[in-house]
Image (cartoon, rainbow, N blue to C red):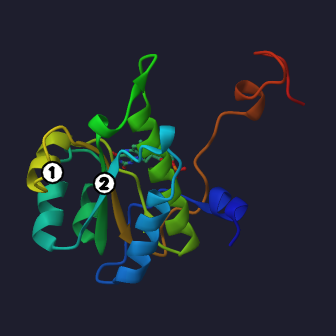
């Protein structure tokens, strides 16, 4: 699979086959994709925590608000990668929190690497981040940017891409509003 195929084929998957393990080697490959992401001044203001135990997965799932469709995904996942941001190692420039931008790029890289490996995931950020940091004994000041449950998609997992805004509404040529076509 090349990068274009991974970009086009990636989907957020929330229904996993229960009991099908993602290998430690594949989990590490996905973490490496995050580690290799670009960052502002190469500050790398992130940490990646791999969680496997059912007790910790359930405790983390309990930190999601009712109605988050990824709650059960976390409970049945083979492993979670918890992406933590370290604001103290990053910067805010012109009100833009680059540490968070950097973590976003790392998360996108992990999404794509998982896709290439045939591993299903979904980025989960609607959660009680401070509670998850406490569960994981993360240092003070660390922020939970996202949780990535990893597994293998159920055969009835959605395959059609979710709709995107039309290119002409979001991409321009030379000046804002001028058509790219
Ligand atoms: C920063 C971020 C946070 C997200 N948080 C959640 C979440 O808490 N729960 C969930 O079910 N999906 C979450 N998603 C997944 C999005 O809903 C999904 O990416 C979007 O609907 C587009 O669908 P696609 O990823 O299949 O293209 C999140 C995605 C991103 C990028």
55 sits left or right of 97 in the view: left
Please tell me which residue lies in front, 110 or 150.
Answer: 110
Please state the total of marks drawn on the protein image: 2
* Residue that appears at 72% across and 25% down: 169
Tell me the quadrant of the picture where the N terminus can be found. bottom right
For the question of whether residue 22 can be seen, the reply is no
Pointer 1 with pointer 2, Cβ within 8 A: yes
Please tell me which residue lies in front, 53 or 155.
Answer: 53
Locate residue 56: give its quadrant: bottom left
Find out if the beta carbon at label 2 lies less than 8 Å from the nearest ligand 1 atom: no
Q: Pointer 1: what residue?
A: 138
Q: Position of residue 139 (x, y in %)?
A: 14, 47
Please tell me which residue lies in front, 104 or 68.
Answer: 104
Q: Position of residue 84 (x, y in %)?
A: 29, 49
Locate residue 75: give its quadrant: bottom left
Badge 1 element = loop
Circle 1 Cα neighbour tier, 10 Å, few/some/many (<14 / 14–19 / ≥20) = some
Tell me the quadrant of the picture where the C terminus can be found. top right
Mark number displayed over residue 180: none
Q: Position of residue 122 (x, y in %)?
A: 41, 56
* Residue that appears at 55% across and 61% down: 112
Q: Pointer 2: what residue?
A: 47
Badge 2 element = strand
6 sits left or right of 128 in the view: right
């Amino acid at each position: 699979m090349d990068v274009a195929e991974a970009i086009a084929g990636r989907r957020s998957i929330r229904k996993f086959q229960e009991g099908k393990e993602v290998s430690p080697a594949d989990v590490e490959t996905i973490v490496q994709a995050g580690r290799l992401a670009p960052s502002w001044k190469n500050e790398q203001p992130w940490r990646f925590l791999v969680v496997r135990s059912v007790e910790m997965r359930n405790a983390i799932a309990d930190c999601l608000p009712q109605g988050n469709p990824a709650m059960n995904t976390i409970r049945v996942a083979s492993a979670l990668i918890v992406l933590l941001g370290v604001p103290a190692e990053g910067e805010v420039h012109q009100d833009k929190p680059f540490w968070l931008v950097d973590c976003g790029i790392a998360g996108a890289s992990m999404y794509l690497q998982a896709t290439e490996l045939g591993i299903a995931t979904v980025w989960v950020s609607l959660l009680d981040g401070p509670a998850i940091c406490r569960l994981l004994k993360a240092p003070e000041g660390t922020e939970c940017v996202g949780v990535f449950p990893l597994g293998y998609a159920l055969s009835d997992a959605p395959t059609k891409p979710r709709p995107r805004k039309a290119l002409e509404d979001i991409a321009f040529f030379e000046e804002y509003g001028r058509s790219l076509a």
